[in-house]
Image (tube, coloured by chain):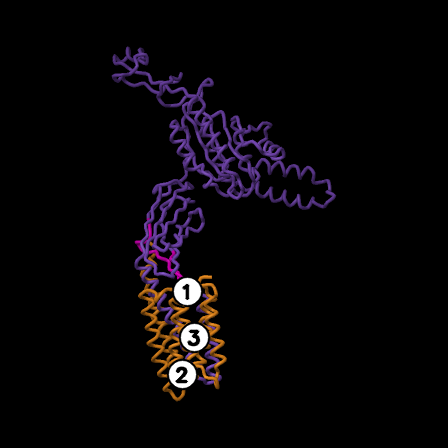
Chain colours: A purple, B orange
Amino acid sequence: MKPGRCTQGIWVMAGLLGAAAIVFNDTSFFLATFSLVLLSVTLAMRFRVRMHRIITSLQVRRSADDEVLQEGHPTTITTRFSCSPDAGIVVSVQDVLPPATISDPTNATAVVSADGNAIIRYSLIPVGKGSIVFPGILLTVSDPFFTSSLVMGSDPFRGPELEAHPNTAFEKSSILEHTGILEKDTIGIYRGSGFRSIREYIHGDDVRSIDWKMTAKYDRVFIREYTTVEKYSPLIVIDLPDRSFPVSDDQLAKLINSSTGEMVAAIRDYGTVSLFLISGVNVIDILLEETNLKRCLALIRASAHPHYRLHHAYRWKDRASRRRFVMKIRAAGSIPQKDGSSRFLGKIAQIYRQSLANPYIPVFSKQMRHLIYSLQTEELVLYSLFEGDLSHIREIARQAQMQRIRLIPRTVAGQDAIKIHSIKQALGMDTLEMIP
Amino acid sequence: MKISLVQILFLLVAAGAAFLSLDPGHTWYLTLIAAAAIILAAFIQQDSDDNRIFTLAFGEIVVIAIAAESFWVSFMVQCAVIGAVMFDGRFMGDTVDRRFFWLYCIIALLCTIIFDRSVQVLIPFLMVTTIVAVTTFILVGFQEMRERRMYAGGNK
């Protein structure tokens, strides 16, 4: 229980009057001093009684939009409080966040209204896998004279328990490439040239698929199952800008609308589409070879919302760029610099050499590589506003180049020429498509 | 400027009692100034810390000034000033407010009697103040500890 400004004032007055009472030995001063002491203890007891009433009447109901969610995937938490506060009392409640989670807004706090109700809504992002239990609430009660806080973590204030599953494992599908035709090891309506298996005839099978040689040999009807022929569907990458950059809703809407259009076209033309949603180096969501347009649109609505923009990581140089830099410095090492920067560059080169010796590969690079390796695609359409650090964009461009995937970068029109030039430089490309 | 009627009433009672106890030969000017000051304090923004502190400070000066004349009148003034602060503009407050105000009045009355009847005031004052402060500290501390143990929960 902490005293407020008023109580501190009362204590100061009591101290001064008490000192005066002892000096003057005056009964009236003693009476005034005692009156102030008695007032402060009465106020303290009154505050405790009121706080006890609030605590005993407090009810918490917490619910989550998804009880099973993916690591790094946001879910909306709604917490409803009800209690019976007395007049003149301010009650504020805060949801204590489970460990290894991030919330937006950071402090999920609400002030209880006069009718005793309060609602907190916030989005919670688990940064690790496993079960997530809400530890409880922090209740703060204050009146003009005292303030007190209480962490309430007993059973009625805990829960529910959420389950965070690990990020999508990029499973490598068994895809056969044969004379330029992509074949998938599944049965489909489009017949490929390779065959998957031979099995006995089942009623309803296409008679054209009967293997006559095997049928004649064993005197039973056998069917030849062919693999499926597939077209290459594009991979659409949407990069949401860093949340610290002021981006207009109009720009974001244009970006999302254009990517949605591309997705619709891809499903119409190829039957499937792969969607990779990132914010800088943070992977927000992924959909691989999705055929259901509604599911794609639902993901766009849920995860590509500006509300879920994250903070991007600090820039980094990829290994090839670091190696090039070291070689460049080594080549120029014998020439002394006029401004004395050779020592600085030497130091940087030394740091790069040390980091090159370390086999560390950033997580985003691994994720990107796994994605591109596992997915058979010829085209990568990148939607970004290219704000702030472009290290992750460079990484995407590099991985696409290594896998000989055509990269089509798209951004919203209205960017200045210098920025467009720097984007092209980062991508190592001459073209950058503009969304009008 | 919005002024609470209840607070004004309490302060008028205090000021009226102060004027009634005016003694031209004693500290009448102090009583007059302090009584005027607590009325002026009511004009400071309502429900603010400044308002409460000013009311209390000048109220206590009135109590001291009147106590020299009449201990009983000063007790009444004291209760009026404390009531103005405790009810904070709400007419007689709620049940909790009323209960604690009466508790205050009873204890203040008992102690006023003790101080009035005592030959020497310092020792009774120290004793009563210590008893009141320690009792409150124990009660409040016990209640707080009990609540923390009951509601804090544990690692599960």
Residues behind callouts 3 and 1 on a single chain: yes
Could you tell me which secondary element the residue under label 2 belongs to?
loop
Sequence-earlier tag: 2 or 1: 1
Residue to which mark 1 is pinned: B4
Please say whether residue A268 is one of the residues in the magenta stretch: no
Residue farthest to the bottom?
Answer: B119
In front here: A245 or A81?
A81
Amino acid at dot 1: Ser
Q: Mark 1, chain letter?
A: B
Amino acid at dot 2: Ser
Residue to which mark 3 is pinned: B15
Could you tell me which secondary element the residue under label 1 belongs to?
loop
Query: What residue is drawn where x is 44% and y is 80%?
Result: B64
Query: What residue is drawn where x is 53% and y is 39%?
Result: A247
Residue A413 seen anywhere in this rendered image of the structure: yes
Picture coordinates of residue A124 (x, y %)? 41, 45
Residues behind callouts 3 and 2 on a single chain: yes
Picture coordinates of residue A279 (x, y %)? 49, 38
Query: What residue is drawn where x is 53% and y is 27%?
Result: A408
Residue A372 seen anywhere in this rendered image of the structure: no
Residue to which mark 2 is pinned: B70
In magenta, the rendered stretch is A138-159
Residues behind callouts 2 and 1 on a single chain: yes
Please say whether residue A157 is one of the residues in the magenta stretch: yes
Number of residue marks? 3
Sequence-earlier tag: 3 or 2: 3
Mark 3 Cα within 10 Å, few/some/many (few <14, many 20+)?
Answer: many
Picture coordinates of residue A3 (x, y %)? 43, 67
Q: Quadrant of residue A285?
A: top left
Mark 1 Cα within 10 Å, few/some/many (few <14, many 20+)?
Answer: some
